[in-house]
Amino acid sequence: MKVLLVHNFYGSSAPSGENSVVLAEQDLLRKNGHEVVAYTRHSDGIRNQGLRGMIRGAFATAWNPFARKDLGELIRREQPEVMHVHNTFPLVSPSIFHAAMGSNTAMVFTLHNYRIFCPCAILMRDGAACTECIENKSAFGSIRYGCYRDSRLATLPLALSVALHRKLGTWSNKVDAFITLTEFQRGMVVRAGLPAEQVFVKPNFYPDPPSPQTWEARENQAVFIGRLSLEKGVKYLVQAWKRWGAAAPRLDIIGDGPDRAALENEAKGSNIRFLGQQPFDKVQEQLSRSRMLILPSVCYEGFPMVIREAFALGVPVAASRIGSLPHIVDDGKNGVLFDPGNADDLVAVVKRNWTDGMLEPMSKAARAKFDKEYTAGENYKMLMGIYEKALARRRAA
């Protein structure tokens, strides 16, 4: 099978799990004998242009006629069975789904977030979860709130894109199969208007993971890995660790972001280390030595890549009871759940399980879940099943 893979890579200054997923899926297809043709764009190209780049990105967001033309020519020349799209923002645009008119190429779209309905992509406003654009089936309220980058002007092209492609029927008529990462996300996008029979669940996977460390080799430490920004809820994690006091295990915070300086200041006097952005291999090494990964998100996550990595390495996960996370972490089995935005509940849950000797069996359950659901082999079978359904729909149409 020939697959045309389409992705707009996010800027290199803000490492993205989506970029990693695309590259892993490309390798997975090639290793299984499929021919992959890649059409990619990079956001660095406009970030380096300052104001000119921002304007260029804004105009391309809703409808990029040049990308549509490029993809139309590519489809006619290569005649792929499937065009699999991961991200169109900001330079590619959903216009590309109109490029396959009259062809037999099936359109598949992986939804890593909620951007086709929500301009800020994570269903969040003023530090709390928000589903107004989902419930109202309109994103124009987001302009009033300035949901994207706290700017009405920056939000405008994204809201217009949502409205345009609802009006054109892009999602109901041009895409043969949507892929969501969890059942929770599937439910959300169906509520927003996607046809339920065309939405399938396929989680992220981890190719060739290392073996877990023995429990005895683990250090007395927990770890957070991710962007240090409001939606990740790291401030509640810092508050929880300070309330735990001197008896708390070491907490390593890996990552960078706009909130780092404030978090470091708040963490003074606690057993917390800020390690900054680290190479992938170093992150995996640090994670493998830990007894728990903590994700205190206050937004609706898709499928955080770090959970996949933690399960592969046999590391239990403590996560907020919000959005997709309770659909990934089995409370009391391979991890624990706590109330989002609640430092008291976070420290109570983690402390109780840390001191009661529950973590080692959770470690084994985490790796067992990985072996059952998140290996490359299982993921490939799911992907092929979705491709076949998309091709059947395209042929019927």
Image (tube, rainbow, N blue to C red):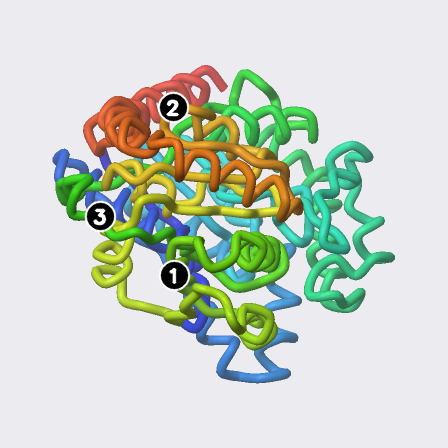
Q: Which residue is mark 1?
A: 252
Disc 3 from disc 2: Cα separation: 19 Å
Question: Residue 185 falls in which quadrant of the image?
Answer: top right
**Which of marks 2 and 1 precedes in the sequence?**
1
Residue at (52, 22) in percent of width and height: 198
Q: Is residue 336 left or right of residue 233?
A: left
Q: Which residue is mark 3?
A: 218
Viewer-proximal residue among 123 and 350: 350
Disc 3 from disc 1: Cα separation: 14 Å
- Is residue 30 among what the camera can see? no
**Which of marks 1 and 3 precedes in the sequence?**
3
Q: Which element is circle 2 on?
A: loop
Residue at (82, 49) in percent of width and height: 140
Where residue 343 appears, as percent x and y from the top left, is 62, 48
On residue 333, the disc is 2
Disc 1 from disc 2: Cα separation: 24 Å
Q: Are marks 3 and 2 in contact (CB under 8 Å)?
A: no
| Tag 3: amino acid | Arg
| Tag 1: amino acid | Asp
Decide: few, some or many residues near mark 3? Use Cα within 10 Å; few <14, some 14-19, many ≥20.
some
**Which of marks 2 and 3 precedes in the sequence?**
3
Where residue 109 appears, as percent x and y from the top left, is 47, 38
Is 232 above or below relative to 168? below
Where residue 363 appears, as percent x and y from the top left, is 28, 33
